[in-house]
Image: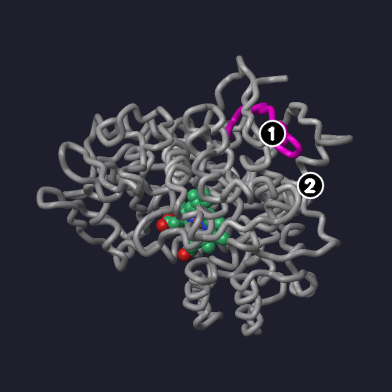
Amino acid sequence: TETQQIILFSTIISLMLKKKDSYIVCACYRKNGEPPLIKGWIPFLGKALEFRKNSQQFLSQLQQEHGDFFTVLIAGRYITFIMNPFLYPSVIKHGKQLDFHKFSDSAASRTFGYPPVQSGLFPGMSDSIQRSYTLLQGSALDLLTFSMMGNLQQVLRCRFLSSEGSGSDGHWQEAELYEFCKCVMFQTTFNTLYGHSANLCLDQLREDIEKFDGIFPLLMARVPIALLGKTKEIREKLIRFFYPQRMAEWRAPCQFIQTRMDLFQQYDTLQDRDKAAHHFAMLWAAVGNTIPAAFWCLYHLISCPEALEAVRAEIINVVGEKNMKLIFEEDITITRQQLEQMVNLESSINESFRLSSVSMNIRIVQEDFCLCLDAQHSINLRKDDIVALYPQSTHLDPEIYDQPQRFQFDRFVEDGRDKTDFYKCGQKVRYYRMPFGSGATQCPGRFFAMNELKQFVCVTLLMCEMQLPENQQEAMLDNSRAGLGIMPPVNPITFKYRTKKNRGQYEEGGMD
Ligand code: HEM
């Protein structure tokens, strides 16, 4: 079974550990001022299985037993969880002692197979990469939004019209919702970022990325790739897709990807394979969370008629009825500014994030030091240990969010604007929603991602009506990816749709 495999991997890894790491494995005694330690009875693995099974439940139980901070041994690492959002700022502002970039650099290089950026071989590259992220924001985002809009309409038009077979007589069709989101978001995101080419087989690329993504949690848990069956072969195939000579043939990559291509070209120390691995990693970052987020947003909207109606009305109001009627004939434009006006849609997306995001914010302790959490609490931390924020516990806190398990599409709207004041015990919570991480290390793609999601919902709802069949099991979250972004659904969800082409655009009919 998978559990046995994990125990086996863990045992092998613990045997393979270097001397430095073996200190970590044995560091089970507590010094004064250190948080309570929960270690379990399995060497190295510690509490990894309980954490993996249902991290939210597991951590909130530990919070009840031990208070707002405690250390847990998980797969060889000592992770100190800070569970109270009022204590988050102390972690977020200690960037020097609690580092994110070294951790993400080594985790990414191990996972995606390129040499660490901060290894000294590539002077200045890390800063240039950080600077390139501005090309996912501001005025560059206008261009990305425009390009994404064109790609979405092309892909969705093609999909909806071809599935109608002989013509658009408005019959209801059926499809699987996650599959639909995967196909559409993968192709449109790829084309928007990397450009177009007639010779590319994007379905195969997507399948390979999905296979790789399935193993991703084990790679992040530092299981050597050599122990993971065909994963290495799949990764090499994915990397080959992005070799510079191939990418040079793709038409109109976005400015962000073009800048990264030029940047990598400046380093003789970077092999073509390594450049390709960087591009592959970026594609994974760009689709890995956006696709499940697209699923949850659409799923919640079509599950809740009131939400669907409010969002649809808002979209038509902003886009205009004329444009709406044109969408099957020609490309329409929805600008970044128009997307900003869609507050119900933005709130629905944020509400979907709240319910499905399990991102863990990780920092590595750079030196033994005492972290002052607030006026009453300080904890001693050891070099190389991990400090983690687990925002899901805040996202589901009934003191902050009334009926936290319920999807409430307008939870983040107040007086027609984004609602930002949320309270716990009468005190305003600053970090109430964190799907994109926190502080200086927040996801650089977050504005682009939010726009993409809005555009996806807009174009889909403008082109067709959607319903869920009755008596279907609710979509459930796949908890096994705890800590790693937006959880995908675990069970298939069928949905019904019919296009609005040649139909009275406003008649919201029942089933034919
Ligand atoms: C719903 C969609 C997305 C979610 C929920 C998401 C979430 C995250 C999170 C949680 C992090 C880690 C930040 C931290 O721990 O402080 C991250 C990093 C990152 N994300 Fe996203 N992301 C999304 C979409 C995107 C997109 C569309 C792109 C690119 C086009 C992107 C590019 C990146 C990159 C490059 C990093 C690493 C930044 C660094 O190492 O400095 N993400 N993302």
The numbered mark, 1 or 2, whose residue comes first in the sequence reads 2
- Taking the magenta stretch, the answer to whether it contains residue 214 is no
Q: Residue at x 35, y 48 (%)?
A: 417
Q: Residue at x 51, y 39 (%)?
A: 313
Q: Which residues are magenta?
A: 489-504
Contact (CB < 8 A) between labels 1 and 2? no
Q: Is residue 107 visible?
A: no
Q: Which residue is mark 2?
A: 158
Q: Residue at x 23, y 61 (%)?
A: 369
Quarter of the picture containing the C terminus is: top right
Q: What secondary structure is marked by label 2?
A: helix
Q: Nearer the viewer, mark 1 or mark 2?
A: 1
Question: Residue 490, image x and y in percent?
Answer: 59, 30
Most common secondary structure along the magenta stretch: loop
In this rendering, position of residue 162 left or right of residue 267: right
The amino acid on which the numbered mark 1 sits, given as a three-letter code, is Gly
Along the viewing direction, whichever of 155 and 115 lies nearer the viewer: 155
Q: What secondary structure is marked by label 1?
A: loop
Q: Which residue is mark 1?
A: 504
Q: Residue at x 68, y 45 (%)?
A: 325
Q: Which mark is residue 491?
A: none
Along the viewing direction, whichever of 272 and 502 lies nearer the viewer: 502
Question: Residue 225, image x and y in percent?
Answer: 64, 52
Crowding at dot 1, Cα within 10 Å, few <14 / some 14-19 / many 20+, comes out as: few
In this rendering, position of residue 15 left or right of residue 149: left
In the figure, 417 relative to 38: above or below? Answer: below
The amino acid on which the numbered mark 2 sits, given as a three-letter code, is Cys
For ligand 1, tell me if the residue under mark 2 lies within 8 Å: no
